[in-house]
Image: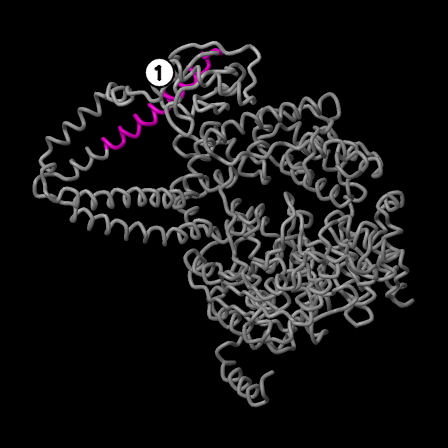
Amino acid sequence: MSSPAERYAAARRRAAQAPQFPALEEFTSDIGFDLDDFQREACQALERGSGVLVCAPTGAGKTVVGEFAVHLALRGTPGQPVPTDGARRKCFYTTPIKALSNQKYHDLVDRYGAAQVGLLTGDNAINGDAPVVVMTTEVLRNMLYAGSTTLEGLAYVVMDEVHYLADRFRGGVWEEVIIHLPASVTLVSLSATVSNAEEFADWLITVRGETTVVVSEHRPVPLWQHMLVGKRMFDLFHDAAAARKHDVHPELLRYTRETVRRLDLGEGRAAGWGGRRGPRWRGPSRPDIVERLDREGLLPAILFIFSRAGCAAAVQQCLAAGLRLTSPEERAEIRRVVESRVTAIPGEDLSVLGYWEWLDGLERGLASHHAGMLPVFKEVVEELFVRGLVKAVFATETLALGINMPARCVVLERLVKYNGEAHVDLTPGEYTQLTGRAGRRGIDVEGHAVVVWSPETDPRHVAGLASTRTYPLRSSFRPSYNMAVNLVGSVGADPARALLESSFAQFQADRSVVGLARQVQRNTETIEAYGVEAECHHGDFDEYFALRVSIADRERALARQGQSQRRAAAVAALERLRVGDVIRVPSGRRAGLAVVLDPAAGGFSEPRPLVLTQDRWAGRISPGDFTTPAEVLARIRVPKHFNPRNPAARRDLAAQVSGTGLDRHSRRGARGRQSGEDHQLTQLRAELRRHPCHACPEREEHARWAERRRRLERDTEELRERVAGRTGSLARTFDRIVALLTTRGYLTAEGEVTDAGRMLGRIWTEADLLVAECLRRGVWDGLSPAELAAAVSVVVFEARRDVDERASLPRGPVAEAVDATLKLWSEIEADEAARGLTVTREPDLGFAWPIYRWARGEALAKVLASGHELDGEMPAGDFVRWARQVVDLLGQVADSGGASAELRATARQAIGVVNRGVLAYHAPA
């Protein structure tokens, strides 16, 4: 805490600055609380006309800076003081998800009134011409490409949660917006704490002009880290100094080591471990954890469980344990809120959705929160939790992204999560994001993060996660077909390439090669110095050294070739051997004469005949023992039932081998090697001897310098290839996309956008080119509304888990349309693979039956049961989310200039039949 004198001095400074920042003074007098230093610094930069990048922890109050941008815009609207330039009137506030847009819309309406604020998401369009409009980032991107008139007068764009640009699937949209916004727009970027804020700011300055970076790592509510070991709670760090040094509390280390030792020794069946076949650790149950938090005054809490089924099971376990965290008054208020929010959902659907069990949990202050829940159920949980009526929420990590649901305490059940492909450890960034929910500003004095210990959890690893601030922002931007036609249509092909090269992705790639490029430069200088040392006054030493290199290369090639030929000849010779053949083993421990006992030829492996040497050793030999092919030197008789294990039999037969009178060692090897001289090698050696530099007395010294230069040149060439692979990589990808689109008729050879290209430019989905091809080829023509919904679902749906067998389809027109879609996808995939492009995802048939049945008016229970899921029926939340994406694509088809009038009409009808029941319900915006 600062001293009274420091606070007084700060107040004096603010008073002195007030005349310089009149808008900020108006704003602070309206909000009714003092700004933190980082908020004031960012707001002052905004009022000076600079863009800002604000990086601060979750809950630190970054959005105040965005709201100040709203205030600046509204100063130019009727009823507000008019700014001197008279032009700055509009502010767009963008968020990554619809729920966050809805939340921010409500906040701004409460403050400025419904007339001043609008909302534009995929689901809602309210007062879109208002001076302040809250929207998802995709909506703004689409406006920019369409040249919407709504952009007129735009002065500020707030990009909340701008670190989303690292998102693998949607992150590129943020970069598109930042690059394409008019230069007159001031950008306000709000981000979680990232470790490369300066790099991101450097890029913003490059593409947007003056940008002030404001970084704050101060949490307004201190966070205390704990570990729960069995029934005991320990502080992770002894004090703040220990936290800075990652020093784990010694008592925690001692206790966990002792616990692991007891488990290893098999001691005890007390609470905490047990099991019939030896000790197995059982951590505290979920009801026990909630009770413990309740006793210690740490509720409300979010308990992160990285599994939807785990979240639902946790609530059931708490109910079975008889937990009740609410008073009668709170239970009555909870029921009132819930009933007012679900009135639009039919009663038969509520029972299918598990409404009564869900309500029972809510009334006891318990709930789960995950993407598989019906959206309205999630919204009710969020509202009740923020109001303090629900005390414990079991959630997947999706709750940590964006939604404002702070808690007093956050519990992590495990430090491993499934990322869609494998179980992976939490990163320090993810840990910070999850635990950042703990501590409610203005309510809690401190926040608490609790990690539940298990034998696999090392407290020192947790200390590293809690203390590390490595959360680098990495661009996920890549060109798409839709982006390509929009860019070419708006600015032309060459300027479009230049725009792509100004992306954060290319900025990072270019920066990563700076070190490589410097190394190339240093190597080049060294190569020149080596070249000076290798110079010879007798002649051109480079030419002479090239002859030496050619000779060495030819000798290696001949050696490889000879070795291969010799081995093949040795194998062939061994395969021809028969019992009684006397051969000579040329080298090795068994060198000398030997007689074949068993040829062991045939089959697919190399021959390994059994032999007896004249030294009485019996064993198998292989082609590797022969530098020249085995030659039959004589034949002797081998007894029919010869036993190689009998010493006397070995002695008698070895004497016969020696009695042949043959030499143990061949004398022809040297002559044989001389007989196969290579003509090219002979010619190169003659040229070398004739060269003037061959007579130089310092020839070998020159050669050493030339060899060093050759090796360094080879290393430098590899570095250059790495540099070339990274620089301009986006532009090369863009060129390949343009070439493919030109071949398919979306662009002309001159770089003009065709009618088909303009249609593609209005399709906003991951499989944009596949959808455009389906429309051009009439694949979806002639379908009924329900059939069309099923057919288009295959290009938007993506199952959460891979399923081995192919999902079934409604017979008839749907199956035919899907088969035609798959055929088109195969053609596109072949084109993409030939050009080295990332291939379009294969259509997924798993949602065709559910959406088909829903569009035909069947009951929700039957629809969810028809999902192609590994673990039973489809969750209601998944069904609603995918059905809304189908509706979104149907809306694009209905508005598409490339679709027939009949298909556009059918798409509108399909939207009508799909938007019913749980889909027709929207939380009030």
**SS of the residue at dot 1?**
loop
- Horizontal side of residue 224 vs 876, given as left or right: left
Residue nearer the viewer, 416 or 29: 416
Q: Position of residue 509 (x, y in %)?
A: 43, 50
Q: Is residue 908 above or below residue 585?
A: below
* Residue 413 among magenta residues: no
In this picture, which residue range is highlighted in magenta? 550-579
- Horizontal side of residue 497 vs 893, given as left or right: left
Tell me which colouring the rendered structure shows.
one colour
The residue most toward the bottom is 5
Residue 848, located in which quarter of the rendered image? Answer: top right
Q: How many other residues sit within 10 Å of disc 1, few (<14), some (14-19) or many (≥20)?
A: some
Q: Position of residue 881 (x, y in %)?
A: 71, 44
User: Which quadrant: the N terminus?
Assistant: bottom right
Q: Residue at x 42, y 25 (%)?
A: 625
Q: Is residue 128 above or below residue 348?
A: below
Q: Which residue is mark 1?
A: 662
**Amino acid type indicated by mark 1:** Leu
Residue nearer the viewer, 507 or 250: 250
